[in-house]
Image (tube, rainbow, N blue to C red):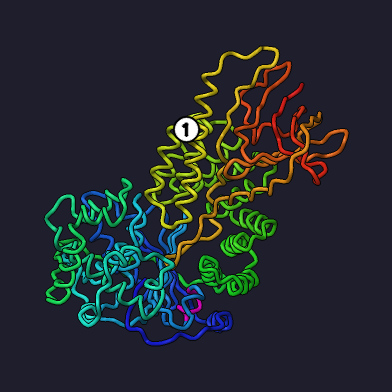
């Protein structure tokens, strides 16, 4: 997000009439070696945007000590020629009275990075928004959770850069911020460090400006102060927070006493003598060498609709995508975006239909293959996804081996079916390696490790996941899985310590896993504006416990088994007395056994009971006929 010259309240727009009118205006696509630019400002301007990003990338590449400046997911930049176009695409909340004016947005999704830019933004540096958003991409590709003040402060530091032939000037002074800070009381550092995506200091016009300005100034001070130190104070701070140190204490250890740092920041702002860095770098770029073409109306509307879906503008997105498909019924990108829209609106059957259509239209679209497969996984009954999932995900991986979401989803597929678990672990680890910033990849890898009876390794993966969470909801999500993994570790240790059982009634080699984690189908692709909750399957609400009746027993066939977070199980038994619906709040505590035979292979309760004959023991529930609390399951031949 780039803050520049607050111009007053923004008016809500009816975006679709604008898009319909702009359909006649040409949108162009320019492809440079590392970026794709889609713009309605003409090919020349699009090439210039691509050139500036390539130059900035070159500077980063040469200053990262051999590290890569390229994220795993492709970068697609939508460069809007003016504020009118820009406002048809951003989240509607940004248009409310009192909100800050922005000139850019970073939208992070597992399968792509969107950067939304407004090319007519005011300011001394016309490329500031471009540099700012690219810095966000690089910050978010790491495996560290970066506090919001440092995330925005670093992006603002690099936004104030100038790139010339053979030299880059990084972190130039920002006159607007300097002037604002000299006439405004600084926020206490404890307040600055506590700002998150929901805070008024991040969203409101009257408070957001001081947050951005002070974040820039503090980051600038720390960058300059730590220029000759290795590791730098900022890196020490991140290492400390990564190891679990509370942010204020981490700042004290890395930056010194808070009171002194607050005083130093005040003096730094008031003296106004901000340093900057000169970096010798090869930045020659031939913008005319970039390929370009004019998009058909349906192609441009598909891209615009996809961004609208990501930003939660569902009504506008639907109209744009309907028009795109009317213009070109064979537009696979529009069909994929329509599927994602239906998924976001929880219209699952429609989403499956659109993703299936997208695969039919373009069998080499990794996105369509991925979403089609994950929708099949979500809709699979009894927790066992069909064979077609594997085929679709393997096709996506074959097309693009670096497409991390497909690897993670295939790992989850094998784990849910309790097969090829060694390969599942390799695929899950590969996804984390390709993009360590995606929380869902780590959760899925932990799930695979639990399937392999390695709760200790799963716990270590989940503990590392805590280092990259960005919201309280994500923290709660990981902690819930950690608690379940630790319970499974205890249960596994107890089970291994048990003496041999009577061979007449021997328990199968059960894997009592602590949770079922859905594949990384992110139902809410979040932008920089405010990360939303992960799209993993939500915890099933616990049933209010009615009074228990007597202990009961039934023989029959298990027709359905559904497991959900954290350890809930719902089981349907078809018997001569009718169908009975049995529930367990913690299926780790349910006793499983087999009478008169030894089940082949491993028996996974959540995926291996469906279709089997069994005798179940349960407590009747008063006032709820044909329902009960599950006690144990005895499998029969």
The residue labelled by disc 1 is 455
In the image: residue 337, left or right of residue 432: right
- Which of 297 and 281 lies nearest the eye of the viewer? 281
Total marks placed: 1
**Above or below, comparing residue 14 to residue 37 in the picture:** below
In the image: residue 408, left or right of residue 131: right
- Which of 52 and 151 lies nearest the eye of the viewer? 151
Camera sees residue 62: no
Which residue is rendered at x = 61% and y = 73% of the image? 315
User: Where does the C terminus fall, quadrant-wise?
Assistant: top right
Dot 1 alpha-carbon crowd within 10 angstroms: few under 14, some 14 to 19, many 20 or more: many
Camera sees residue 293: yes
In the image: residue 272, left or right of residue 323: left
- Which of 499 and 562 lies nearest the eye of the viewer? 499
- Which of 579 and 516 lies nearest the eye of the viewer? 579
Quarter of the rendering containing residue 362: bottom right
Residue 614 percent coordinates (x, y): 76, 27
- For the record, the magenta segment spans 85-90
Residue 339 percent coordinates (x, y): 62, 60
Which residue is rendered at x = 87% and y = 35% of the image? 577
- Residue 88 part of the magenta-drawn span: yes
Residue 406 percent coordinates (x, y): 51, 46
User: Which residue occupies the extreme right position in the image?
Assistant: 576
Quarter of the rendering containing residue 38: bottom left
Regarding mark 1 in the picture, which secondary structure is present there? helix
In the image: residue 407, left or right of residue 391: left
- Residue 222 part of the magenta-drawn span: no
Residue 355 percent coordinates (x, y): 63, 56
Which residue is rendered at x = 56% and y = 83% of the image? 14
Which residue is rendered at x = 59% and y = 62% of the image? 344
User: Where does the N terminus fall, quadrant-wise?
Assistant: bottom left
């Amino acid at each position: 997000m780039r803050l520049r010259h607050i111009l007053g309240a923004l008016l809500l727009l009816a975006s679709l009439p604008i898009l319909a009118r702009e359909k006649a205006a040409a949108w162009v696509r320019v492809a440079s070696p590392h970026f794709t630019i889609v713009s309605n400002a003409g090919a020349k301007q699009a090439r210039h945007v691509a050139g500036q990003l390539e130059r900035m990338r070159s500077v980063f590449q040469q200053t990262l000590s051999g590290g890569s400046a390229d994220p795993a997911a492709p970068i697609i930049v939508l460069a809007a020629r003016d504020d009118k176009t820009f406002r048809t695409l951003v989240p509607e909340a940004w248009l409310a009275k009192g909100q800050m004016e922005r000139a850019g947005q970073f939208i992070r999704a597992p399968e792509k990075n969107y950067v939304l830019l407004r090319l007519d933004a005011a300011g001394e540096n016309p490329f500031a928004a471009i540099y700012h958003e690219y810095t966000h991409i690089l910050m978010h590709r790491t495996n560290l959770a970066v506090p919001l003040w440092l995330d925005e402060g670093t992006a603002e530091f690099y936004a104030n850069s100038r790139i010339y032939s053979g030299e880059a000037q990084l972190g130039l002074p920002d006159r607007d911020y300097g002037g604002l800070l000299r006439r405004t009381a600084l926020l206490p550092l404890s307040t600055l460090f506590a700002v998150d995506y929901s805070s008024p200091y991040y969203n409101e016009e009257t408070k957001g400006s001081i947050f951005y300005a002070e974040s820039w100034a503090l980051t600038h001070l720390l960058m300059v102060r730590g220029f000759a130190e290795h590791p730098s104070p900022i890196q020490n701070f991140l290492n400390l927070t990564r190891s679990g140190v509370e942010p204020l204490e981490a700042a004290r250890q890395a930056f010194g006493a808070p009171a002194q740092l607050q005083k130093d920041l005040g003096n730094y702002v008031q003296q106004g003598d901000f340093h900057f860095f000169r970096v010798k770098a090869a930045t020659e770029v031939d913008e005319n060498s970039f390929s370009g073409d004019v998009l058909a109306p349906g192609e441009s509307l598909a891209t615009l609709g996809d961004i609208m879906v990501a930003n939660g503008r569902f009504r506008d997105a639907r109209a744009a995508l309907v028009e795109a498909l009317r213009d070109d019924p064979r537009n696979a990108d529009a069909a994929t975006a329509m599927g994602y829209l239906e998924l976001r609106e929880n219209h699952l059957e429609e989403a499956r239909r659109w993703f299936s259509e997208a695969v039919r239209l373009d069998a080499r679209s990794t996105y369509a293959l991925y979403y089609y497969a994950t929708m099949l996984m979500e809709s699979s009954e009894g927790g066992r996804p069909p064979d077609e999932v594997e085929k679709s995900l393997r096709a996506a991986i074959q097309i693009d081996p670096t497409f991390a979401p497909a690897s993670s989803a295939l790992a989850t597929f094998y784990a849910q079916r309790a097969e090829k678990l060694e390969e599942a672990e390799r695929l899950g680890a590969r996804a984390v390696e390709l993009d360590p910033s995606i929380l869902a990849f780590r959760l899925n890898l932990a799930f695979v490790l639990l399937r392999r009876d390695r709760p200790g390794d799963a716990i270590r993966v989940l503990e590392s996941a805590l280092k990259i969470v960005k919201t309280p909801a994500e923290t709660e999500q990981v902690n819930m899985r950690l608690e379940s993994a630790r319970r499974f570790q205890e249960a596994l240790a107890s089970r291994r310590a048990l003496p041999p059982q009577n061979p007449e009634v021997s328990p199968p080699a059960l894997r009592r896993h602590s949770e079922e984690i859905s594949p990384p189908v992110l139902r809410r692709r979040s932008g920089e504006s405010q990360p939303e909750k992960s799209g993993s399957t939500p915890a099933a609400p616990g049933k209010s416990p009615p009074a228990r009746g007597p202990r009961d027993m039934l023989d029959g066939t298990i027709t359905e088994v559904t497991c959900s977070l954290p350890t809930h199980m719902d089981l349907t038994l078809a018997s001569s007395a009718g169908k009975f619906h049995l529930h367990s709040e913690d299926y780790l505590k349910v006793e499983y056994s087999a009478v008169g035979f030894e089940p082949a292979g491993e028996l996974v309760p959540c995926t291996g009971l469906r279709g089997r004959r069994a005798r179940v023991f349960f407590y009747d529930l008063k006032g709820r006929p044909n329902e009960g609390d599950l006690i144990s399951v005895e499998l029969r031949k």
